[in-house]
């Protein structure tokens, strides 16, 4: 059932009107909701910048105020998205939503969950898994770049999650500790992921070696995925009405799986 039909079928109580309004704002393709979705996207990206800079800002006096303010914004956004959902329980079981709730917990208890704060960068991953992220970009003709952008984001998220883990688990461990700052942890992560291996910074002990092995294996896989998405011909998301195949070439006339006639809008109509 479409969003408009669902809203027409709901009773017109105050709560239903609120849900109807939120559903329009978060899911409609009309110009007004599109502007709202783009504004939410900008705020989300600003929050992610704060998450990336958190290790450098933690000692600042204003850190907790910013942290709790972002918690309030993220909490309001989660509540609004829940109300905009047609099935709240099903929405709550989605992995991106579960990750967002965990991130909210780290924001509400930054002192207790400080060692898990590096997982906040997963917000970037959950954000790009939402249709509301790509819808305003698609309207601006950027939908063709979804796959390479997603590959870049996956790599960035992996880099910062691993950097946060390395910094939390190995900083200042023992007299021979090689990692003393967040920048050194990031440097180690990048050199390990790229298999450059200068050897000037290494993780101590058996667990350090095992961590390095996992970083290299996953890092190589993400780089291969990124290269494939960049050099492989771009495709558009357009489900075939006949067989449901999701991706086609931008100029495709027939579905390559079943031969059904397609009517893919050009980039100017996205």
Image (cartoon, rainbow, N blue to C red):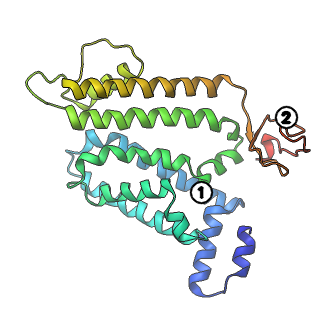
25 over 260 or under it: above or below: below
Residue at 50% from the left image edge and 28% from the top image edge = 222
Judged left or right of residue 79, residue 117 is left
Nearest to the observer: residue 66 or residue 86? 86
Q: Which residue is mark 2?
A: 251
Residue at 30% from the left image edge and 55% from the top image edge = 106
Q: Which mark is residue 131?
A: none
Q: Nearer the viewer, mark 2 or mark 1?
A: 2
Which picture quadrant has residue 249? top right
Secondary structure under the numbered disc 1 in the rendered image: helix
Nearest to the observer: residue 218 or residue 146? 218
Q: Which residue is mark 1?
A: 37
236 over 203 or under it: above or below: below
Residue placed furthest toward the left: 175
Q: CA distance from mark 2 to mark 1?
A: 28 Å
Residue 9, visible in the rendered structure? yes
Which picture quadrant has residue 202? top left
Judged left or right of residue 261, residue 140 is left
* Image x and y of residue 12, in percent: 66, 86
* Image x and y of residue 29, in percent: 71, 59
- Tell me whether the residue at label 2 lies in contact with that at label 1, contact meaning CB atoms closer than 8 angstroms: no
Secondary structure under the numbered disc 2 in the rendered image: loop
């Amino acid at each position: 059932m479409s969003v408009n039909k669902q809203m027409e079928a709901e009773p017109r109580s105050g709560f239903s009107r609120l849900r109807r309004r939120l559903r329009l704002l978060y899911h409609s393709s009309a110009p007004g909701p599109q502007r709202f979705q783009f504004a939410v996207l900008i705020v989300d990206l600003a929050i992610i910048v704060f998450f990336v800079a958190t290790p450098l800002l933690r000692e600042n006096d204003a850190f907790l105020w910013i942290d709790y303010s972002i918690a309030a914004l993220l909490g309001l956004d989660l509540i609004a998205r829940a109300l905009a959902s047609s099935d709240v329980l099903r929405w709550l079981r989605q992995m991106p939503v579960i990750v967002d709730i965990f991130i909210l917990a780290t924001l509400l208890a930054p002192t207790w969950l400080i060692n898990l704060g590096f997982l906040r960068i997963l917000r970037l991953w959950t954000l790009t898994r939402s249709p509301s992220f790509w819808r305003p970009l698609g309207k601006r003709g950027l939908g063709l770049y979804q796959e390479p952008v997603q590959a870049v984001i996956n790599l960035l998220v992996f880099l910062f999650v691993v950097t946060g883990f390395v910094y939390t688990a190995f900083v200042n461990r023992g007299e021979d500790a090689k990692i003393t700052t967040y920048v050194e942890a990031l440097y180690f992560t990048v050199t390990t992921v790229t298999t450059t291996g200068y050897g000037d910074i290494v993780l101590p002990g058996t667990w350090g070696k095992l961590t390095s092995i996992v970083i290299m294996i996953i890092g190589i896989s993400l780089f291969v995925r990124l290269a494939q998405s960049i050099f492989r011909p771009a495709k558009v998301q357009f489900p075939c009405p006949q067989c449901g195949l999701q991706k086609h070439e931008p100029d495709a006339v027939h579905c390559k799986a079943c031969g059904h006639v397609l009517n893919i809008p050009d980039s100017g109509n996205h």
